[in-house]
Image: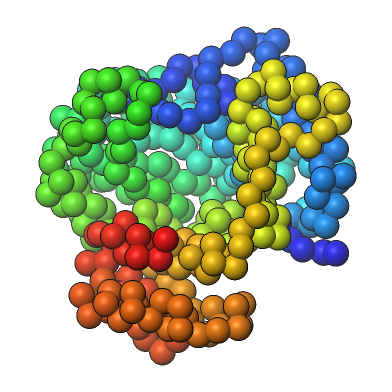
Amino acid sequence: MNRPAGVYIHIPFCVRKCNYCDFLSWRAGESEREEYTRDLVREIGLSDRWFPEIDQVDSVFIGGGTPSILSAGQLQRICEALDRRFSIQEGCEFTIECNPGTADRHTFAACLNMGINRISFGLQSSVKKELQLLGRIHSYEEAERSFQEAREAGFQNINIDLMSGIPGQTIESYGRTLDRILHLEPEHISAYSLIIEEGTPFYERYGEEPPVDEETDRQMYRTTGVRLSEYGYERYEISNYAKDGFACRHNLKYWSGGEYIGFGVGASSRVGNIRYHNEEDPAAYTKRIWQERRTADLEEALDREAQMSEFFFLGLRKTRGVNLTEFERLYGISAFDIYGRQIRKLVEYGLLKQQGYQLYLTDYGLDVSNLVFCEFV
């Protein structure tokens, strides 16, 4: 069976964990990184036993953590394992996340030679005190240098991550960061509001109280949309903007119910209507691989009700929304037979708009999207 899927590879290592981060990541020495690379290569090779129906791949995303902390040789071995296991489609979008200062022009050139054709820089801010408060390891100048080196190496598809709602951030300082990012002219910008997560240093310091008031955060969000639109970026998802032809195809799989296989500790997969979640304990993950057992420690079968729910609360993240004809084709019933009350209410309140068979968030709905999604959960 030939079903193009996505591949996600989790690299859990960082130079230093940021103060807001609750991702599965930690500091590790060279020997641990080498052993983990060995385990990843083995897991990828064994996956044809667990997911034999997936043999074609049209997007790959190496995330973390800080994947660029691996050596070029380690990345090469991972890419070779993917080539052996899958048929990588021509034009496959192949992304690696990179923290500024953890890679140089030689690393970028090596990545391109491996087939990696998209890079995502975790910039977050251009303001020194904001970067220091976040616990980032780089300055804006280092980030700018990394960006230019990636360009000079030949990368023509670059994303920059941007954060608003940082403690002490103002409309003015956020505007300066926007200006600097726009000056770099990346093809894609991911702009997120800071969320304080339990178990992080920020949670201990700020608790559940947002460090920036809601109105200021909303103003930053609206400013982002206006400024990026002026420079030719189209918002295609709540927090993601791209120049024409550069929307992230891998992430669109998540929002459109596509299939993907995750490799590495804590990585998730969705094949058919079953979701898998890998072991988060590194020792248990390694043990399973060398016993040739499936690395997932959790399987969740999505029943018909869960599938229909996800169709809306994931699909509505996209600014073009969801297609009601597609819903009926997939589930054999009209969306209004299941969610008619919710849809009519949200349209009446100005949160959703229906145009033909397309249903999507209004500008007001984008501002309060979580309220909309809750209606379909």
**Above or below for 307 versus 28:** below
**Could you tell whether 21 is left or right of 225 in the image?**
right
Q: Position of residue 178 (x, y in %)?
A: 27, 45
Horizontal placement of 49 versus 67: left or right?
Answer: right
Q: Is 52 or 117 nearer to us in this picture?
A: 52
Pick the residue in front: 70 or 354: 354
Asked whether 315 or 330 is in front, the reply is 330
Residue 314 spot, x, y in % from top left:
47, 61
Across and down, in percent, residue 73 comes to 74, 24
> Which quadrant, please, contains the C terminus?
bottom left
Q: Is residue 119 above or below residue 136?
A: below
> What colour scheme was applied to this rendering of the protein?
rainbow
Choose top left, top right, bottom left or bottom right for residue 256: bottom right
> Which quadrant of the structure image shows residue 168?
top left
**Farthest residue, direction bottom:** 356
Q: What's the residue at 53%, 24% (across, down)?
A: 25
Identify the residue at image location x=48%, y=65%: 309
Q: Position of residue 280 (x, y in %)?
A: 61, 28
Q: Residue 110, can we see it? A: no
Give residue 338's quadrant in the image: bottom left
Reply above or below: 81 against 307. above
